[in-house]
Structures are given as C-alpha cells and as structure tokens.
Image (tube, grey):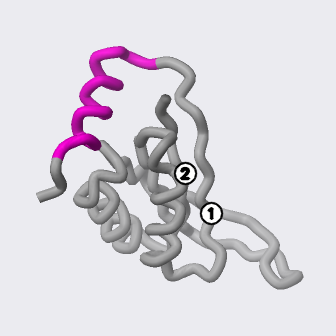
Amino acid sequence: MFAIVYITTSSKEESTRIGKKLVQERLSGCVNIPNDVKSFYYWEGNIEEDTESVLLVKTKTSKVEKIIKRVKELHSYENPCIVALPIINGSPEYLNWLNEEMERDSN
C-alpha cells in the first residue's frame, strides 16, 4: 500500500531541504515540489495569509509515521501540515519502482 504525504513549509528552500532528507533516508522514493501556493488559515485567533511551499512525498503507508516524526524534527513550524492520502491505484511499474527505491540501502 502506498500514500502521498502532503506537507506545507515556509519556503521552497525548506521544502528542498526536507524533501532531500526524506529521499536520502529512503523514507520516500520521490518528492515533488510544485510552485508556491497561497494559504489562508486561522492561527492564534487571526486569519493569516501566506505564500507557502508544498511537498508531495510518495511513500509506502508503512513509512508514514516515520515521515511525520522526521518532518517535525526538520520543520520550522510549530504545528506543520502533514497529511497522508492513500494511493488507491497506479501504474504497477511505477509503484514497483517506488517500492524498490525505498527498500535500497541509504548509503
């Protein structure tokens, strides 16, 4: 079973740093960082408006808890958005590749 973990960060630089770590540590087979997004949200009673960066982390569901823990260690936010969405189907060849990459030694 596979998932995409959606994470927002303060900047493309922070997304790049976190994304590279997740791939290097074999917690993800691939991370995408699309263009920045405009975010609106409540924080401490006020509506905030920010430009944020997004990570789309492709992984196995068995690695999601480790990703959440690792991202919290690396992230600048007090309470980062980290949500996992199941991949219900996909190209068998791609999912096989994704699985093999996460099973390799991280050296």
Q: Classify mark 1: helix, strand or loop.
A: loop
| Pointer 2 local density, CA inside 10 Å: few below 14, some 14–19, many at least 20 | some
In this rendering, position of residue 20 left or right of residue 63: left
- Corner quadrant of residue 101: top left
Visible residue check, residue 31: yes
Residue type at the position of mark 2: Tyr
Secondary element under disc 2, as helix, strand or loop, is strand
* Predominant SS of the magenta segment: helix
Q: Is residue 19 above or below residue 105?
A: below
Label 2 vs 1, first from the N-terminus: 2
Is residue 66 in the magenta section? no
Task: Report the residue at 56% width, 22% height from top.
Answer: 88
Q: Which residue is mark 1?
A: 81
Where does the image place residue 21, in percent across and percent down from the top left? 29, 65
**Which residue is rendered at x = 32% and y = 65% of the image?**
16
Which disc is residue 6 wearing? 2
Residue 71, image x and y in percent? 47, 68
Q: Report if residue 100 lies within the magenta region.
A: yes
Nearest the viewer among 45 and 68 is 68
Which span is picked out in magenta? 90-104
Total marks in image: 2
Q: Amino acid at mark 1?
A: Cys
Q: Residue at x 37, y 16 (%)?
A: 91
